[in-house]
Image: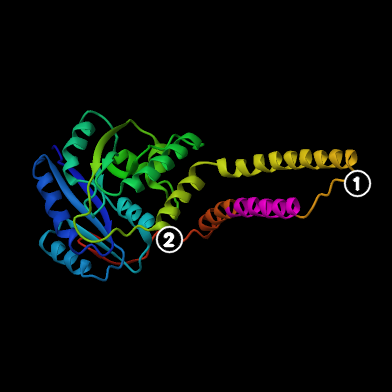
Amino acid sequence: MHCQKVISITSSCWNEVDNIPLFYQRCKAELAKHPQYDYEFIVEDNLSTDGTREILREIAAKDPKFKVILNANNFGHIRSPFNALLNASGDVVFNLCSDLQEPPEMLSEFLKKYEEGYKVVAGVRSGTKASLLLEFFRKCYYSLLAKTSSDAQVIPKFTGFGLYDRCFMDALKKFNDPYPYFRGLVSEIGFKRTEVPFVQEKRKFGKTKNNFFTLYDMAMTGFVNHTKLPLRMAAFSGFVIAFMSLLAALGYFIYKCCNWNSFQVGMAPLVIGLFFFSAVQLVFIGILGEYIGAIYTQVKNKPLVIEEERINFDE
Protein backbone atom coordinates (compact mmCIF):
# COMPACT_ATOMS: atom_id res chain seq x y z
CA MET A 1 0.00 0.00 0.00
CA HIS A 2 1.41 3.39 -1.02
CA CYS A 3 1.91 5.75 1.92
CA GLN A 4 1.49 9.48 1.43
CA LYS A 5 4.65 11.45 2.13
CA VAL A 6 4.55 14.07 4.90
CA ILE A 7 5.98 17.59 4.78
CA SER A 8 7.02 19.01 8.16
CA ILE A 9 6.96 22.81 8.28
CA THR A 10 9.22 23.97 11.12
CA SER A 11 9.67 27.41 12.61
CA SER A 12 10.15 29.24 15.89
CA CYS A 13 8.78 32.51 17.20
CA TRP A 14 9.05 35.12 19.90
CA ASN A 15 6.43 37.87 20.12
CA GLU A 16 5.04 37.36 16.59
CA VAL A 17 1.33 37.74 17.41
CA ASP A 18 0.52 39.51 14.11
CA ASN A 19 2.70 37.33 11.88
CA ILE A 20 1.69 33.84 13.06
CA PRO A 21 -1.88 33.81 11.59
CA LEU A 22 -0.58 35.03 8.23
CA PHE A 23 2.31 32.58 8.40
CA TYR A 24 -0.16 29.72 8.90
CA GLN A 25 -2.53 30.91 6.14
CA ARG A 26 0.21 31.34 3.54
CA CYS A 27 1.75 27.97 4.36
CA LYS A 28 -1.64 26.23 4.14
CA ALA A 29 -2.35 27.93 0.79
CA GLU A 30 0.97 26.65 -0.53
CA LEU A 31 0.37 23.14 0.82
CA ALA A 32 -3.01 23.06 -0.96
CA LYS A 33 -1.10 23.13 -4.27
CA HIS A 34 0.48 19.78 -3.39
CA PRO A 35 -2.32 17.38 -2.35
CA GLN A 36 0.01 14.43 -2.93
CA TYR A 37 1.70 15.36 0.36
CA ASP A 38 0.32 15.26 3.89
CA TYR A 39 1.67 17.84 6.33
CA GLU A 40 2.46 18.81 9.90
CA PHE A 41 3.57 22.09 11.50
CA ILE A 42 6.16 22.26 14.27
CA VAL A 43 6.21 25.77 15.75
CA GLU A 44 8.32 26.46 18.84
CA ASP A 45 7.59 29.49 21.00
CA ASN A 46 10.26 31.21 23.09
CA LEU A 47 8.09 32.41 25.99
CA SER A 48 6.23 35.11 24.03
CA THR A 49 4.44 37.76 26.09
CA ASP A 50 2.37 39.55 23.42
CA GLY A 51 -0.41 36.98 22.90
CA THR A 52 1.47 34.75 20.45
CA ARG A 53 0.92 31.70 22.66
CA GLU A 54 -2.84 32.25 22.67
CA ILE A 55 -2.86 32.45 18.86
CA LEU A 56 -0.82 29.25 18.64
CA ARG A 57 -3.26 27.48 20.95
CA GLU A 58 -6.23 28.66 18.87
CA ILE A 59 -4.73 27.39 15.61
CA ALA A 60 -3.71 24.09 17.24
CA ALA A 61 -7.27 23.60 18.57
CA LYS A 62 -8.64 23.89 15.01
CA ASP A 63 -5.89 21.96 13.23
CA PRO A 64 -4.56 18.80 14.94
CA LYS A 65 -1.63 18.76 12.50
CA PHE A 66 -0.45 22.10 13.87
CA LYS A 67 1.97 21.06 16.63
CA VAL A 68 3.27 23.56 19.15
CA ILE A 69 6.19 23.46 21.58
CA LEU A 70 6.00 26.05 24.36
CA ASN A 71 9.41 26.66 25.91
CA ALA A 72 9.83 27.34 29.61
CA ASN A 73 12.12 30.28 28.81
CA ASN A 74 13.54 32.20 25.86
CA PHE A 75 16.29 29.92 24.58
CA GLY A 76 17.31 32.20 21.74
CA HIS A 77 17.44 32.28 17.98
CA ILE A 78 19.89 29.37 17.62
CA ARG A 79 18.67 26.65 19.96
CA SER A 80 14.88 26.91 19.56
CA PRO A 81 14.74 26.63 15.73
CA PHE A 82 17.13 23.68 15.93
CA ASN A 83 14.92 21.92 18.50
CA ALA A 84 11.89 22.43 16.25
CA LEU A 85 13.82 20.74 13.42
CA LEU A 86 14.71 17.78 15.62
CA ASN A 87 11.04 17.27 16.48
CA ALA A 88 9.94 17.06 12.83
CA SER A 89 8.79 13.58 11.81
CA GLY A 90 8.01 14.17 8.13
CA ASP A 91 9.67 12.61 5.09
CA VAL A 92 10.81 16.09 4.11
CA VAL A 93 11.23 19.19 6.28
CA PHE A 94 10.56 22.78 5.16
CA ASN A 95 12.30 25.19 7.54
CA LEU A 96 11.60 28.94 7.52
CA CYS A 97 11.20 31.96 9.79
CA SER A 98 7.78 32.92 11.14
CA ASP A 99 8.35 36.64 10.41
CA LEU A 100 7.65 35.93 6.70
CA GLN A 101 10.90 37.45 5.45
CA GLU A 102 11.45 34.02 3.93
CA PRO A 103 8.42 33.48 1.65
CA PRO A 104 6.41 30.26 2.16
CA GLU A 105 5.60 30.41 -1.56
CA MET A 106 9.11 29.05 -2.23
CA LEU A 107 7.87 25.61 -1.15
CA SER A 108 6.72 24.71 -4.68
CA GLU A 109 10.12 25.47 -6.20
CA PHE A 110 11.91 23.63 -3.38
CA LEU A 111 9.70 20.56 -3.84
CA LYS A 112 10.44 20.56 -7.55
CA LYS A 113 14.17 20.34 -6.80
CA TYR A 114 13.53 17.71 -4.12
CA GLU A 115 11.60 15.56 -6.58
CA GLU A 116 14.54 15.83 -8.99
CA GLY A 117 16.60 13.94 -6.41
CA TYR A 118 18.21 16.62 -4.26
CA LYS A 119 18.35 15.81 -0.55
CA VAL A 120 19.02 19.40 0.53
CA VAL A 121 17.49 22.44 -1.16
CA ALA A 122 19.02 25.60 0.32
CA GLY A 123 17.41 29.00 -0.12
CA VAL A 124 20.05 31.69 -0.64
CA ARG A 125 19.38 35.43 -0.72
CA SER A 126 19.85 37.01 -4.14
CA GLY A 127 18.63 40.35 -2.78
CA THR A 128 16.72 41.93 0.06
CA LYS A 129 13.94 44.43 0.64
CA ALA A 130 15.17 44.88 4.20
CA SER A 131 18.33 46.73 5.34
CA LEU A 132 20.87 47.10 2.51
CA LEU A 133 23.61 48.12 4.94
CA LEU A 134 23.10 44.97 6.98
CA GLU A 135 23.09 42.92 3.78
CA PHE A 136 26.48 44.41 2.85
CA PHE A 137 28.01 43.35 6.17
CA ARG A 138 26.44 39.90 5.83
CA LYS A 139 27.97 39.53 2.37
CA CYS A 140 31.41 40.41 3.74
CA TYR A 141 31.00 38.00 6.65
CA TYR A 142 29.89 35.02 4.56
CA SER A 143 32.63 35.68 2.04
CA LEU A 144 35.27 35.66 4.79
CA LEU A 145 33.79 32.57 6.48
CA ALA A 146 33.58 30.69 3.17
CA LYS A 147 37.24 31.42 2.42
CA THR A 148 38.52 30.48 5.87
CA SER A 149 36.32 27.52 6.81
CA SER A 150 38.33 24.44 7.75
CA ASP A 151 35.32 22.16 7.13
CA ALA A 152 33.14 21.97 4.03
CA GLN A 153 32.59 25.42 2.58
CA VAL A 154 29.74 27.28 4.28
CA ILE A 155 26.97 28.34 1.87
CA PRO A 156 27.07 32.14 1.34
CA LYS A 157 23.85 34.10 2.08
CA PHE A 158 22.22 31.03 3.58
CA THR A 159 20.32 31.23 6.89
CA GLY A 160 18.78 27.76 7.18
CA PHE A 161 15.77 28.46 4.97
CA GLY A 162 15.30 25.36 2.87
CA LEU A 163 13.97 21.85 2.33
CA TYR A 164 15.62 18.78 3.87
CA ASP A 165 15.14 15.08 3.18
CA ARG A 166 14.63 12.59 6.02
CA CYS A 167 18.10 11.09 5.48
CA PHE A 168 19.62 14.51 6.18
CA MET A 169 17.44 14.97 9.27
CA ASP A 170 18.49 11.57 10.63
CA ALA A 171 22.15 12.58 10.18
CA LEU A 172 21.47 15.91 11.88
CA LYS A 173 20.24 14.14 15.01
CA LYS A 174 23.65 12.53 15.46
CA PHE A 175 25.18 15.94 16.29
CA ASN A 176 24.73 16.31 20.03
CA ASP A 177 25.53 20.02 20.07
CA PRO A 178 24.00 22.24 22.81
CA TYR A 179 24.65 25.40 20.76
CA PRO A 180 24.58 24.36 17.07
CA TYR A 181 25.39 26.48 14.03
CA PHE A 182 22.82 24.93 11.71
CA ARG A 183 23.79 26.74 8.50
CA GLY A 184 27.33 25.37 8.94
CA LEU A 185 26.10 21.85 9.71
CA VAL A 186 24.23 21.78 6.39
CA SER A 187 27.54 22.09 4.57
CA GLU A 188 29.36 19.74 6.91
CA ILE A 189 26.83 16.88 6.73
CA GLY A 190 26.71 16.85 2.95
CA PHE A 191 24.26 14.92 0.71
CA LYS A 192 23.26 15.98 -2.79
CA ARG A 193 22.48 19.69 -2.56
CA THR A 194 21.25 22.51 -4.73
CA GLU A 195 20.75 26.21 -4.06
CA VAL A 196 17.69 28.27 -4.99
CA PRO A 197 17.85 32.10 -4.94
CA PHE A 198 15.12 34.20 -3.35
CA VAL A 199 14.57 37.84 -2.41
CA GLN A 200 14.25 38.47 1.31
CA GLU A 201 11.03 40.29 2.11
CA LYS A 202 10.45 43.08 4.59
CA ARG A 203 8.78 42.23 7.86
CA LYS A 204 5.00 42.34 7.59
CA PHE A 205 4.44 43.24 11.24
CA GLY A 206 6.54 43.98 14.30
CA LYS A 207 10.21 44.77 14.69
CA THR A 208 13.20 42.53 14.12
CA LYS A 209 14.43 40.70 17.21
CA ASN A 210 18.02 40.87 16.00
CA ASN A 211 20.40 43.47 17.37
CA PHE A 212 24.17 43.94 17.45
CA PHE A 213 24.64 41.36 20.20
CA THR A 214 22.52 38.61 18.60
CA LEU A 215 24.18 39.16 15.21
CA TYR A 216 27.63 39.18 16.81
CA ASP A 217 26.76 35.97 18.67
CA MET A 218 25.70 34.28 15.43
CA ALA A 219 28.79 35.50 13.58
CA MET A 220 31.23 34.34 16.26
CA THR A 221 29.43 31.00 16.59
CA GLY A 222 30.03 30.47 12.88
CA PHE A 223 33.71 31.32 13.14
CA VAL A 224 34.36 29.27 16.27
CA ASN A 225 32.59 26.21 14.85
CA HIS A 226 34.03 26.25 11.35
CA THR A 227 37.41 27.95 11.22
CA LYS A 228 40.65 28.07 13.22
CA LEU A 229 41.88 31.13 11.31
CA PRO A 230 41.60 33.64 14.23
CA LEU A 231 43.76 31.41 16.44
CA ARG A 232 46.35 30.98 13.73
CA MET A 233 46.29 34.71 12.99
CA ALA A 234 47.10 35.33 16.65
CA ALA A 235 50.14 33.07 16.45
CA PHE A 236 51.36 34.45 13.11
CA SER A 237 50.81 38.05 14.23
CA GLY A 238 52.80 37.36 17.38
CA PHE A 239 55.77 36.17 15.32
CA VAL A 240 55.51 39.08 12.87
CA ILE A 241 55.19 41.74 15.57
CA ALA A 242 58.06 40.20 17.56
CA PHE A 243 60.26 40.26 14.44
CA MET A 244 59.31 43.87 13.64
CA SER A 245 59.99 44.86 17.26
CA LEU A 246 63.42 43.25 17.05
CA LEU A 247 64.20 45.17 13.85
CA ALA A 248 63.01 48.44 15.40
CA ALA A 249 65.12 47.84 18.50
CA LEU A 250 68.16 47.03 16.37
CA GLY A 251 67.58 50.17 14.27
CA TYR A 252 67.35 52.33 17.40
CA PHE A 253 70.50 50.75 18.80
CA ILE A 254 72.52 51.36 15.63
CA TYR A 255 71.26 54.95 15.31
CA LYS A 256 72.08 55.61 18.96
CA CYS A 257 75.59 54.23 18.52
CA CYS A 258 76.13 56.51 15.51
CA ASN A 259 74.66 59.58 17.24
CA TRP A 260 75.35 58.88 20.90
CA ASN A 261 75.34 62.45 22.16
CA SER A 262 72.66 64.00 19.94
CA PHE A 263 69.98 61.29 19.65
CA GLN A 264 67.32 61.18 22.37
CA VAL A 265 64.86 58.29 22.27
CA GLY A 266 62.12 60.14 24.19
CA MET A 267 58.94 58.77 25.78
CA ALA A 268 56.61 58.91 22.76
CA PRO A 269 57.82 55.69 21.03
CA LEU A 270 57.70 53.82 24.33
CA VAL A 271 54.15 54.95 25.17
CA ILE A 272 52.85 54.31 21.63
CA GLY A 273 54.48 50.88 21.53
CA LEU A 274 53.10 50.00 24.95
CA PHE A 275 49.51 50.85 24.02
CA PHE A 276 49.78 49.19 20.60
CA PHE A 277 51.04 45.89 21.94
CA SER A 278 48.54 45.99 24.80
CA ALA A 279 45.69 46.42 22.31
CA VAL A 280 46.96 43.54 20.17
CA GLN A 281 47.16 41.32 23.25
CA LEU A 282 43.61 42.19 24.33
CA VAL A 283 42.23 41.43 20.85
CA PHE A 284 43.81 38.01 20.74
CA ILE A 285 42.90 37.23 24.35
CA GLY A 286 39.31 38.01 23.33
CA ILE A 287 39.55 35.64 20.36
CA LEU A 288 40.98 32.93 22.59
CA GLY A 289 38.14 33.61 25.03
CA GLU A 290 35.56 32.95 22.30
CA TYR A 291 37.02 29.50 21.65
CA ILE A 292 37.29 28.72 25.36
CA GLY A 293 33.67 29.83 25.79
CA ALA A 294 32.60 27.47 23.01
CA ILE A 295 34.49 24.62 24.67
CA TYR A 296 32.84 25.47 28.00
CA THR A 297 29.41 25.38 26.38
CA GLN A 298 30.13 21.92 24.95
CA VAL A 299 31.54 20.57 28.22
CA LYS A 300 28.49 21.66 30.23
CA ASN A 301 26.34 19.67 27.78
CA LYS A 302 23.14 21.45 28.79
CA PRO A 303 19.84 20.42 27.16
CA LEU A 304 19.02 22.25 23.96
CA VAL A 305 15.82 23.74 25.45
CA ILE A 306 13.46 23.11 28.36
CA GLU A 307 9.93 22.53 27.14
CA GLU A 308 6.96 23.66 29.21
CA GLU A 309 4.18 22.18 27.10
CA ARG A 310 3.66 20.25 23.87
CA ILE A 311 0.41 20.54 21.93
CA ASN A 312 -0.93 18.01 19.36
CA PHE A 313 2.03 15.65 19.78
CA ASP A 314 1.28 11.94 20.09
CA GLU A 315 3.32 11.16 23.16
Colouring? rainbow
Counting residues from the start of the chain, the first of labels 1 and 2 encountered is 1
Report the Cα–Cα distance between label 1 and label 2: 70 Å
Q: Which residue is mark 2?
A: 303
Three-letter code, disc 1: Asn
Q: Vertically, is 209 above or below 243?
A: below
Q: Is residue 163 visible?
A: no
Residue at 44%, 53% (x, y): give it: 216
* Residue toward you, 111 or 243: 243
Q: Vertically, is 40 above or below 148?
A: below
Q: Name the outermost residue toward the top.
A: 116
Identify the disc placed on residue 261: 1
Q: Residues within 10 Å of mark 1 (few under 14, many from 20)?
A: few
Dominant SS type (magenta): helix
Where does the magenta region start and end? 268-286
Q: Vertically, is 217 above or below 137?
A: below
Q: Secondary structure at mark 1?
A: loop
* Residue toward you, 264 or 2: 264
Q: Secondary structure at mark 2?
A: loop
**In this picture, residue 63 sits left or right of residue 304:** left
* Residue toward you, 148 or 297: 148
